[in-house]
Image: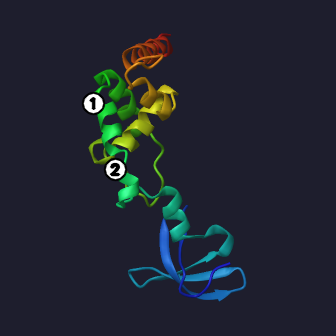
Amino acid sequence: MFNVGDTVRNVTANVVGVVVELDGDTVYLEQSNGCEVDFDASSLVLENDFQAKHGTDVRKDAGSRENDAVYSALIDNLYPAIVQLGQTAHANEPRVSGIVPKGWHALSSLQKLNAISKAANIPVKTWLDSNQSGANTNIGTLQLSVLAAASKKARP
């Protein structure tokens, strides 16, 4: 349940506010513009929980950045058509109410890799492994197989 002072969100209505009063299952919120609204408690989530699940912020600590060079090197080795698959997948992601989506160029290399991986149905680890010298399946072969599979899907 919620407490007075909690910041909560009604996802459906895209309303965020601070809990000012509780009356049974009814929660009264004050929005940033000063307007008070009420919702059934079951329709609300804590804003911190919502942002943790749907937020687009990239962590800034050193640990989150230790593999950036590896991810960037992989992105640099990808064919433009493979990158385009990721861009298209990212652009077509369902939007979450209350979250402003980042454009492709604002994404970190890992976020781009995640989009490419989802579009190609190939895990990030497989992409990373293929970019190593002496890999069983090299990056070029992997990309060609992904593009061949994508062209088969595109045919009627």
**Residue 109 x/y as whole percent:** 34, 42
Where is residue 111, by image quadrant? Answer: top left
Would residue 49 appear left or right of 41 to someone viewing this image?
A: left
Residue that carries the numbered disc 1 in the rendered image: 76
Give the mark nearer the N terminus: 2 vs 1.
1
Q: Residues within 10 Å of mark 2 (few under 14, many from 20)?
A: few
Would residue 35 appear left or right of 6 to someone viewing this image?
A: left
Residue flagged by tag 2: what amino acid is it? Lys
**Residue 76 x/y as whole percent:** 27, 30
Residue drawn at 43 percent across, 23 percent down: 130
Q: Residues within 10 Å of mark 1 (few under 14, many from 20)?
A: few
Residue drawn at 42 percent across, 32 percent down: 116
Residue flagged by tag 1: what amino acid is it? Asp
Residue that carries the numbered disc 2 in the rendered image: 102
Would residue 8 appear left or right of 83 to someone viewing this image?
A: right
* In the depicted structure, whether residue 129 falls above or below residue 92: above
